[in-house]
Image: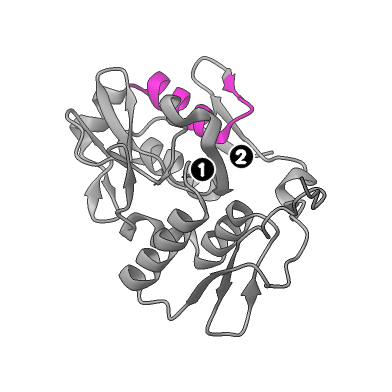
Amino acid sequence: MEDHGPQKRAPRKKLRITFPDGDVLCYTDSTSTMLAALAKIGKDRFPEIKLEIGGHPIITQQILPKYKAYMREICDGWYLNTQSDNACKYMQMKAINDTLGLGLKVEVGTDFKARAIPDRAVRHRTKETLRIHFPEDDTYIALESPQDGYLEAVRKIGINKIVNRRIPYKSYTLATRVRESSRQLPVDDCWIYVPGSIKDKALMLRTIALCLRIPLDVSIV
């Protein structure tokens, strides 16, 4: 029997995304390419993206326990469920482009020149968090995760007070007794929106304190 030697592995397909400004994103794995593209698109557009996996948004502000192994941070507390192959990521990016009208060129191929997988800048900088001081009882909240700190502060202030005050958040009510959006997170038996960036979280906590007329010092450290 003729020995043809070891068979060569088929070239790995890569995702390439070209923006109208000429910026081309193509890394050696499609997940990194998609994360970089979404970061460039920006978190302000994420609520417009309605794609789902298993009945949950593929882009969310919480790590879904069922998909914990696949959740990757895009930016500022927004996460992407990466449980999909190259072909699926291609279709997801095509759908995102069509929904948002971005004018992207989305391609999959084997002969694209790819960059090395990036060491994302967030890994090399000191991670910022919130320090929240309640002067009335001189207690502090300073958790590693800004989102956890925000939610813990809301819990200490009293979620029912916030719900009753009907504080506006964008075109929504900040906190509600029933879940009105997949973008809300639970606090006790109510639901609240969590702003994306750490600066917006700090601003919202100050707004809550102002509306409820309670002393509160919020800083980013």
Residue 22 position within the rendered picture, expressed as x and y whole percent measured from the top left: 61, 85
Tell me where residue 198 appears, x and y as whole percent.
55, 45
Please indicate whether residue 165 sits to the left or right of residue 206 in the image: left
Occupied quadrant, residue 183:
top left
Q: Amino acid at mark 2?
A: Ser
Magenta span of residues: 140-158
Q: In this rendering, does residue 215 appear at all?
A: no
Q: Residue at x 44, y 35 (%)?
A: 62
Look at the picture and state if 182 lies above or below 88. above
The extreme bottom residue here reads 21
Residue of label 2: 219
How many C-alpha atoms fall within 10 Å of the one at disc 1: few (<14), some, or many (≥20)?
Answer: many
Type of amino acid under label 1 = Ala
Decide which of 45, 1 is in the foreground and name it. 1
Q: Residue at x 50, y 49 (%)?
A: 85
Q: Earlier in the sequence, mark 2 or mark 1?
A: 1
Q: Quadrant of the N terminus?
A: top right
Residue 92, labelled with which disc? none
Is 144 positioned to the left or the right of 74 in the image? right
**Disc 2 to disc 1: CB gap under 8 Å:** yes
Viewer can see residue 191: yes
Where residue 18 sits: x, y (%)?
57, 77
Q: Nearer the viewer, residue 156 or 216?
A: 156
| Residue at disc 1, secondary structure | helix
Q: CA distance from mark 2 to mark 1?
A: 7 Å
Q: Look at 57% across and 44% down and name the residue there.
A: 73
Residue 26 located left or right of residue 186? right
Query: Looking at the figure, which quarter contains the C terminus?
Result: top right
On screen, residue 112 above or below 52: below
**Image position, residue 217 (x, y; %):** 55, 34
Q: Residue at x 78, y 59 (%)?
A: 116
Task: State the residue position of label 1.
Answer: 202
